[in-house]
Image: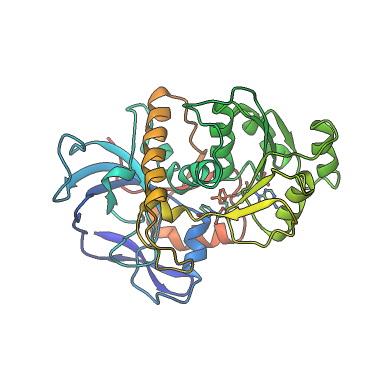
């Protein structure tokens, strides 16, 4: 099959490789569409592994083969699914920028017939990360057990793919969603359920958020979907940092938050796959994270089936995987805004 593989630091090439075989607990998916993430360029920049690993985390497609102990009652050949992989680390774990990939049968999102593969490919890392930041280290209300009384959550960088899913999942859990984005994305975020959207480049952004919250810093929850020094400093200024603080900031990158009493925690989406991570951030297999991963897959399947999971706007690139290097560099240059770069791999009929 054709796959985009790492051939050097930051460098990829479309090569001919073997179709993978599903191992125990896995299925073989024919990839119809794959979406790109910042993780693609970030992991390619690491010096290890040198070459040969497959690139691409997010896929959608059709199950073509069941692994040895996957029951045909549970998963069906021909089933339409989406998911994510811990790509660009080992050849065995595979990658999504390929004609086929193998994936954990329990970590798949079932797709309704009316969701296109292109849209479904954007669920992947971003939607599972949204579940993780809301429900792994914090026990916030969920769409299945909503807040009795709404309370605010601050979502910094709401136009990011992670942010778009956090906004809708938090809103569907009964929370009041306050978010930040460039002005051209405010309407999109309101359509996803944001109650208030502020421009993060506005020098008065913090005072405007505090004014919206009745002049008091938030003593609840924030998700910093950008997690750079500058964003976390602004988020921290919106939160209560005195000794009675109950405030929590969820981070998607391991940036240092200069806070005294606020709890700031980084989480790593790949731990939801239930295996040790052998890459830059080394975690053992964490069964409780795996349980959350499986629960998230079934929640996202449920929301997709109900027609209430809004996927990320797509930019389907014209030459597919042949131009992967160009689009990976494009994302590294910070040019992706409120949309996903999507590669159509097998044309759906
Ligand atoms: N911890 C994990 O396991 C995990 C998992 C997935 C992703 N991540 C990380 O999470 C981050 C977001 O990923 P993503 O795929 O959601 O990104 P993305 O969709 O590529 O994010 C692009 C958006 O970021 C917004 N943005 C950029 N700088 C900003 C700032 N200073 N303040 C507020 N918004 C800003 C822009 O908003 P505007 O267009 O409105 O300007 C832009 O639309 C990445 O760093 C990624 O590596 C971590």
Image coordinates of residue 81 in percent, x first then y, are 31, 39
Q: Quadrant of the N terminus?
A: bottom left
Q: Residue at x 57, y 54 (%)?
A: 252
Q: Is residue 14 above or below residue 267?
A: below
User: x, y (%) of residue 208?
Assistant: 83, 37
Q: Is residue 45 above or below residue 256?
A: below
**Most foreground residue, 116 or 165:** 165
Q: Is residue 138 above or below residue 102?
A: above
With 35 as the anchor, is 258 left or right in this view? right
The reply, left or right, for residue 195 in relation to residue 113 is: right
Residue at 74% from the left image edge and 56% from the top image edge:
259
Total number of numbered discs in the rendering:
0
- Give the x, y percent position of residue 248: 66, 46
Residue in the foreground of this view, choosing between 120 and 305:
305
Question: Is there any visible trace of residue 326 in the rendered image?
Answer: no
Give the image quarter of residue 155: top right
Indicate left or right for 127 with 348 as reference. right
Residue 285 lies, in percent from the top left, at 37, 59
Query: Which residue does the image show at 79% across and 40% down from the upper left?
Result: 217
């Amino acid at each position: 099959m054709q796959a985009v593989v790492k051939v050097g630091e930051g460098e990829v090439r479309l090569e001919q490789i073997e179709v993978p075989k599903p191992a125990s607990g896995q299925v073989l998916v024919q990839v119809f569409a794959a979406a790109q993430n910042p993780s693609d360029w970030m992991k390619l920049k690491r010096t290890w592994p040198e070459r040969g690993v497959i690139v691409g985390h997010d896929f959608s497609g059709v199950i073509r083969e069941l692994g040895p102990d996957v029951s045909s009652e549970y998963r069906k050949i021909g089933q339409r699914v989406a998911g994510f992989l811990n790509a660009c680390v080992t050849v065995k774990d595979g990658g999504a920028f390929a004609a086929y990939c193998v994936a954990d049968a329990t970590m798949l999102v079932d797709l309704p017939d009316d969701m296109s593969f292109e849209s479904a490919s954007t669920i992947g890392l971003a939607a599972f990360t949204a579940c993780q930041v809301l429900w792994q280290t914090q026990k916030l209300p969920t769409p299945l057990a909503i807040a009795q009384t709404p309370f605010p959550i601050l979502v910094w960088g709401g136009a990011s793919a992670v942010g778009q899913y956090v906004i809708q999942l938090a809103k569907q859990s009964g929370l009041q969603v306050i978010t930040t984005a460039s002005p051209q994305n405010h309407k999109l975020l309101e359509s996803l359920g944001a109650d208030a959207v502020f421009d993060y480049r506005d020098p008065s952004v913090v005072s405007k958020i505090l004014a919206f919250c009745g002049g008091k810093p938030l003593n609840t929850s924030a998700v910093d979907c950008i997690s750079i020094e500058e964003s976390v400093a602004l988020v921290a200024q919106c939160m209560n940092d005195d000794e009675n603080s109950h405030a929590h900031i969820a981070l998607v990158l391991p940036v240092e938050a200069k806070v005294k009493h606020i709890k700031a925690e980084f989480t790593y989406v790949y731990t939801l796959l239930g295996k040790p991570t052998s890459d830059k951030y080394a975690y053992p297999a964490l069964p409780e994270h795996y349980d959350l991963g499986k629960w998230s897959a079934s929640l996202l399947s449920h929301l997709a089936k109900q027609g209430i999971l809004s996927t990320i706007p797509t930019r389907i690139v014209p030459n597919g995987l042949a131009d992967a290097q160009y689009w990976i560099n494009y994302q590294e240059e910070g040019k992706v805004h409120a949309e996903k770069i999507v590669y159509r791999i097998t044309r759906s009929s």
